[in-house]
Structure formats: structure tokens, C-alpha cells
Amino acid sequence: MTHTLPTPAAATSLPAALANSLVARHAGSSLVEQIVQLVAARIDDKLLRTGARMPSIRQFADTQGVSRFTIVESYDRLVARGYLESRRGSGFFVRAPASAPGAPSRTAASAAPQQLDVAWLVRNMFRQLPPENMPGGGLLPHDWLDASLVASGLRAISRQQQSLLLHYGTPKGYLPLRQQLQLKLAEHDIGASPEQIVTTSGVTQALDLVARELTQPGDTVFVDDPSWFLMFGSFAALGLKVVGIARHADGPDIAQLAALAALHKPKLFVINSVLHNPTSTSLSAAKAFQVLRIAEEHAFTLVEDDIYCDMHPGTAVQPATRLATLDQLQRVIYLSGFSKTLSANLRVGFIACSGELATRLSDRKMLTALTTSEIGERVVYKILSEGRYRKHAERLRAKLDQARAPALRQLEQVGLKLDPVTPAGMFVWADAGCNTNVLTERGMAQGYLFAPGSLFSPSQLPSTRLRMNLATGLDAGVWRFLERELASSQAARP
């Protein structure tokens, strides 16, 4: 049950940044921590200015529908964290950052900069906003996933020899899981022995290991444009030059790929073949052969990120072409995992590649992280080996199919323009017709997290695009916000 302000009159003396805020009884964190995060975020986003007086304990408790003790503890924590100061007889006030030695740096907090960057979005993704307020989020709703699958796996391994829980994992990863992954890859007609598979802490670590092993500072890496934003910052931190290749409905722009490959001589091209993020489009067979030809001609490696593979039905009506299937891991490195379909917290991913490269990547993995957690790998192995994962994936696809049409209708009703949408995947690449950086900043001020198009391009230039998650049952306030903002932007055009 969500508590909002009881009457408009009660909110008139509240700061505007808190007038529409709310706490949720059903949220995973406590009411105290929700209020602390809410107020801290408003201060970080400069919506509550230095010196501003906070509502009285009684007033804030009444508007939130919580006890006064909850507000007292919340304010005490905010004082301890350097966000507020208590003035005897006057109340609580927003503290200036410079007057709080040891307090969390405001530069590390979640204030939205003039030009949004990748770190800004990632920081805000971890602010634990309600899922229905995160149309830009990248996960399926928790109630779509099956926590009992993970829980039963954890219980099962805890009943085994308990000393197994106290050891390191093995360098390449839990062998029975790698053997099971061999069977899973065979379903995609990708031949790989267990010795060609290295487990990782999600696809994020897999990409990092591959980039560290195969590139040097100053090298060029190609990515789809648009594509998964987290790569840009990670590759830049390694001293790599990131160049975007325009992505069309059937794959990359082949003419541009060939021209830029001749110019830049890239070491890697990271590509989504199936259910590309953020457009949910898939690579055609014709484009796949052309990409492989250009990679061979210019001697660069293709890194195929297939994290959304199990959201694709893989039928004759909707064929899925994978570079690793055509190439059989000669010039292609294949990445996938289970964070999107089982649990983001398990962090179980994997790399499939040539045997020689797998050994090198395993050695690099040991140097940077020793081993991955065998506990999570054993859980995933149990789920896969018992055949429960296949049925779970089928249920997820059915839920996406059911949610897609109503969500698309709603997106169009509020004024977003949609490209021809593929009948699979969880994302839509929508055109808002206005600068979505501005829309995102305004949305965050209302407690809504959007994913603006600028973040999905290496250029980071302002864009009219938004990535929208079709699986998220959005709060009515999100739709009202979008409708109001889009209508306002259209009215302002000459």
C-alpha cells in the first residue's frame, strides 16, 4: 500500500521537491531508509537547496502516513550522513557540503549533469526506485521471475557437503555447469567443449576480460550505435577509442562498417545479434555473412553479446541468426548469462571461444578476481540440469507477449512514435520528438527514471529517443508525466 499526502492543503507548506514524494509499504527497504534515500536524492539533485528548512517531524510524518519516530530516525540518519543539520529550537536544515567533513561527496551522488552520462544513469538505477517508476530500467519485474527456483537451488547446495561452500571456485568455472552450457550452446548450433567455456561474473566482467586480453590503450573498439551504454565508460577507462556503427533493423550499416574498419583498424566489434539492446531488433542472415566477411578482411574479432537469447522464441517465423553459429568460435567470441532471466544478483555469465583463448582468459580472470562464486554457479547448474529453466523461459516469453500490445498502445497514446516493432524482446526504442535529456531530468525530479537516447551512443549527443521497458507495469503518474511533457514540447515548436 502506498501512502500519499492526505489532502492538498496539508502539502502547501512542504518544499515542492517533497510535495509529491511517497513511501511504499511493500518496498524492499524499510520506511526509514526509503525516507533517507528520498530526501538525500532531492538534495543531491539540487531540488532541496542548502539552508532550506525541512518539514517539521509531525508534518512530515502526517503527510507520509508514518509514525513520528520514523521521521525522527530518518532525520537523525540524514544528519549523520552529512545531509542535514539540527538547529536547537528551529528544526532541521539542508547542510552545505563544505560544512560536513567526512560526509558523502556530493560529486559522487546522483545529481543530473547538464549532459547526462553513463555513470549518472547507473547511479540512479541503484537508488531503489519502485519498478513501476523506472520505465528506463533494464530488468524484468521481480514478480515475473521465479525466486523459488533460486531458493530451492540454494537450499539444495546447502544440504550438500558444507565445506564446498567455503572453498574458492575453479579458474574456468564449475565443471558440471560448463558441461551443461555445452548442451545449451548446442541448441544454438554452436559447438564448444567445456574447455572452451569460462564462467564470469555476468556479461559485464566477460566484456572486461576480453577487452583487457585483446586490446592495448589507444586501440579502437567498434560498438553498435545505439548500444549498451555501460561499455562506453568501461572501454574508455582502458584507454580505448570507442567508435559507433549505425544499427539498422537488420543489423549494422555495412557500408559504414567497411569504411570505418579500413580507417580505424579496430581490434574488436561488440555486437548484439539477437534482441539488440535498446531496439530489440535482430541480425539478418545476409548482414551476418557480410559482418563476418569484413571482420576477416580487416582482421578484427567479433564479440557477440547474447544476453537476451532466451527471450527470443527462435522459431522459423522469427529466425535468430548468430555469428557464433556461422563462425563456430573461430573469429567470434560468444557471451551470455542469466542475470536477465533468473536473477541479477546471481551474476552468472560465461564466455565461449577458442580453447587457446579460453585458457588465456581464465588466467586473466585469476589475476583480476581469482575465481567466480561457485555457489551461484551450482545454483544455475541445478536449475538448468533439472529442466526447470526451459519452462521458466517459456513463461517469461509468454508474459512479454501478453504485455507487449497494451504497452505499445499506451506508448502511442501518450505521444511517442514507434518504429516497426519486432514481436519479441523487452525494449522499445521510441521517439519522443524532443530532447530526452531534458525530459529525463524533469522525470527524475518527479521520481521517474527514464533512459535517454544520448546514453546509448558513444557520441553522447542529445537525442529524441528513449529506451522503454515493455515489461514494467508503469505507474499512472509516469503516463501522465509523459503525456504532459510531450504535449508541451509539441506546443513549443514553431
Image (tube, rainbow, N blue to C red):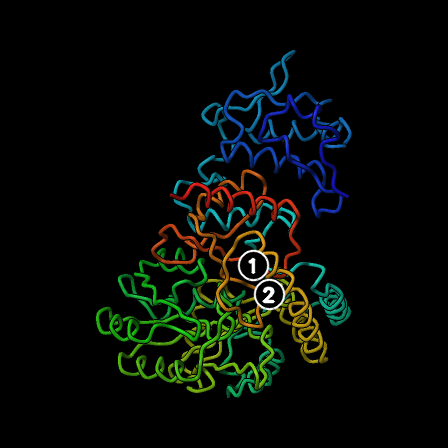
Q: Which residue: 55% across, 66% down?
A: 372
| Viewer-nearest residue: 198 or 306 | 306
Q: Is residue 270 above or below residue 470?
A: below
Q: Is residue 477 above or below residue 283?
A: above
Residue 360 position in % (x across, y down): 41, 75
Q: Is residue 274 left or right of residue 480?
A: left
| Viewer-nearest residue: 281 or 337 | 281
Q: Quadrant of residue 427?
A: bottom right
The answer to whether marks 1 and 2 mark residues whose Cβ atoms lie closer than 8 Å is yes
Q: Is residue 155 left or right of residue 214?
A: right
Q: Residue lying furthest front in this view?
A: 494
Q: Residue lying furthest left in this view?
A: 263
Does the rendering let one see residue 209?
yes
| Viewer-nearest residue: 472 or 125 | 472
Q: Secondary structure at mark 1?
A: loop
Of labels 1 and 2, the one closer to you: 1
Q: Quadrant of residue 480?
A: top right
- Disc 1 to disc 2, C-alpha distance: 8 Å
Q: Quadrant of residue 147?
A: bottom right
Tell which circle, 1 or 2, labels the residue nearer the N-terminal end.
Answer: 1
Residue 324 position in % (x across, y down): 45, 82
Q: Which residue is mark 1?
A: 138
